[in-house]
Amino acid sequence: MPHLESRAIPLQTHLRDQVANALRAALIAGELRPGVIYSAPTLATELGVSATPVREAMLDLAREGLVEAVRNKGFRVTEMTEQDLDEFTDIRTLIEVPTVGRVAETATIEQLETLRPLAEQIVVAAREHDVIKYLEADHRFHLELLALAGNHHLVEVVADLRKRSRLFGLASLNEADRLIASAQEHVELVDLMVAGQVKEAEDCMRRHLAHVRTLWADGRAEVEGREPALRSRSRS
């Protein structure tokens, strides 16, 4: 049975990046499971490409900490522990909460309003059960918000944390409408910042990150609790 559902890759430029994005999508959907080893040739066949861009993409994901190379076998999807989830959330809270306060104080209303279409896209994607668009819009919203603070290194740090922590099992939560409440918090945050309510905006971001932490854990539990739907996988 195929590991990946309907993720054929068209032959275009930047094939390595397209393959990496398809594999991230498969991780999000729970099609690639933590602790399982996948071979590049097998995944390449399912994606309709050669094994080379798959190996290159997997090396990119390995640098992000999402998979690890297993000699002569392929790549294992890395496990994410409860401690990992707590530590990622702690770091993001330390960075993003005060940054939201600073942006609320210093950004113009026009700058803040540029975030609203993204916030609304997140809500629409959650309601339409499109987890990929949800995560893409969510990713852009948070990084563009942080960029308003004028520190590109800060943005890069959070972008890296998000790559390491946003995956695994959200698709099942999305199907159960579990992402809508978290999505709506983005609109609430924009409203508070535009209104100049600095403390309330910081509180909203702190609450949002705690909410996301719960979703990560629930999504992980959903993936680990399901019976494997896929066959012919090797394990170490």
Image (tube, rainbow, N blue to C red):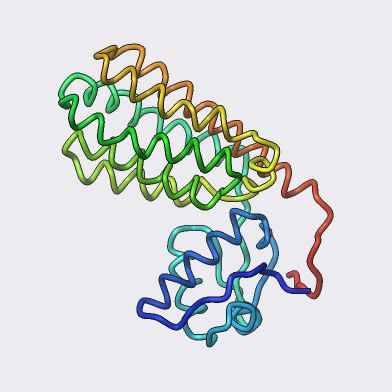
Q: Nearer the viewer, residue 227 or 177?
A: 177
Image vertical order of residue 214 relative to residue 64, above or below: above
Q: Residue furthest right?
A: 227
Query: Which residue is drawn at the image coordinates 21% and 45% (left, top)?
Result: 152
Give x and y (percent) for residue 138: 43, 42
Image vertical order of residue 157 relative to residue 4, above or below: above
Number of numbered discs on residues: 0
Query: Which residue is drawn at the image coordinates 22% and 26% (left, top)?
Result: 103
Query: Which residue is drawn at the image coordinates 28% and 44% (left, top)?
Result: 155
Give x and y (percent) for residue 216: 59, 39
Q: Left of 28 or right of it: where is 236?
A: right
Q: Looking at the figure, which quarter contains the N terminus?
A: bottom right
Image vertical order of residue 71 relative to residue 80, above or below: below
Give x and y (percent) for residue 3: 70, 70
Image vertical order of residue 196 relative to residue 140, above or below: above
Give x and y (percent) for residue 50: 53, 87
Q: Looking at the figure, which quarter contains the C terminus?
A: bottom right
Query: Which residue is drawn at the image coordinates 57% and 49% (left, top)?
Result: 130
Q: Left of 143 or right of it: where is 183?
A: right
Q: Nearer the viewer, residue 1 or 234?
A: 1
